[in-house]
Amino acid sequence: MMTHELAASVVQLAVPMADSNVPTGADFKDWVLVIAGNIFIAILVLRAIGHYFKREWGELFGHIAAGVLVGGLIYANNQTINVLKGFWGLLSGGN
């Protein structure tokens, strides 16, 4: 097999991998995260209403603070992953 024939066969094999029509699962991941986030918000609101009516102010504010943290982790997961990778790089001495 000649070199140019080999290169042409490699290009033919690589073209389907670069096709943008191949599903990656990113849309499904986003859909699952949106559903999980909405369920989380519904639970947060129901528990916050319960704490409010029981006049449990400390638990209400603690619950809201935890909800904001976890909601941020759900809705900004790529940024969270980058921050955690940065912290791990600082701790492990890597770049």
Image (cartoon, rainbow, N blue to C red):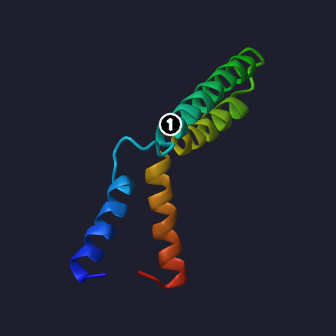
Where is residue 18, by image quadrant? bottom left
Q: Is 78 above or below relative to 74?
A: below
Q: Nearer the viewer, residue 56 or 88?
A: 88
Q: Is residue 41 above or below residue 9?
A: above
For image coordinates 57% across by 43% down, the residue present is 69
Residue visible at 53% across and 73% down? 88
- Answer above or below: position of 84 versus 48: below
The amino acid marked with disc number 1 is Asp
- Given residues 31 and 1, the one toward you in this image is 1
In-image side of 6 versus 17 (left or right): left
Image quadrant where one finds the N terminus? bottom left
**In terms of secondary structure, where does tag 1 sit?**
helix
Q: Position of residue 23 (x, y in %)?
A: 46, 42
Q: Percent x, y for residue 65?
A: 60, 39
Question: Residue furthest toward the right?
Answer: 54
Residue at image x 26%, y 69%?
Answer: 8
Q: Give the residue number, with chain letter if any, for mark 1.
A: 30
Q: Quadrant of the C terminus?
A: bottom left
Residue located 24% across and 82% down the image:
3
Q: Residue 28, how many percent across, how many down?
A: 53, 36
User: Left or right of 28: which side holds 62?
Assistant: right
Frontmost residue, 45 versus 95: 95
